Image (spheres, grey):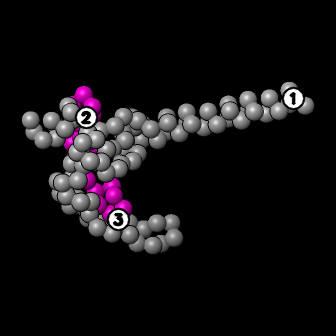
Amino acid sequence: MKKILIGLGVAILIIFGGLQIAQKMIMGGESYYVQITTNGEKGTSQDSNGTTMNKYDYDLTGYNEDGDSKDLAFTAYRDRPLRKEAYLKITWNEKKGVTGYEEVQESDIPADALNQLKGA
């Protein structure tokens, strides 16, 4: 009985670990930092239920922690545009492009990326 429980525990750990690795490979990636400078290009989109929603397309230059640049295109599905002058941390994946973003404070941005964003 003890061997069965140990085997079951190991199997659960392997499955959970595999799912975490797959999630990281599919949705994870390198972090880039951007500053919102425009309202984006407004458009509309319909979901699978036929509900119409606003979307804002952005095409901005982002910088990684080393200050290296990358042109990033992403869409925000929101009622209004992203806040101008806001800083975003964007996750970029080689296979999927931009997979996510979150607003961050200026103090959370690595120095080399911040210097590039400020034009220093």
The image shows residue 81 at horizontal and vertical percentages of 26, 63
Left or right of 90 on screen, residue 51: right
User: Which residue corresponds to the image point at 36% horizontal and 34% vertical from the top-left?
Assistant: 30
Dividing the picture into quadrants, the one containing residue 119 is: top left
Q: Residues within 10 Å of mark 2 (few under 14, many from 20)?
A: some
Task: Tell me the amino acid under the disc marked 2.
Answer: Pro
Q: Which mark is residue 52?
A: none
Q: Earlier in the sequence, mark 2 or mark 3?
A: 3
Q: Which mark is residue 110?
A: 2
Q: Residues within 10 Å of mark 3 (few under 14, many from 20)?
A: few
Q: Nearer the viewer, mark 3 or mark 1?
A: 1
Q: In the rendered structure, does residue 69 fall within the stretch colored magenta?
A: yes
Q: Earlier in the sequence, mark 3 or mark 1?
A: 1
Q: How many callouts does the rendering have? A: 3
Left or right of 20 on screen, residue 11: right
Find the distance from the CA under tag 3 to the CA under tag 1: 52 Å
Q: Nearer the viewer, residue 84 or 96?
A: 84
The image shows residue 117 at horizontal and vertical percentages of 16, 41
- Can you identify the residue that label 1 sits on? 2
Which residues make up the magenta segment? 55-77
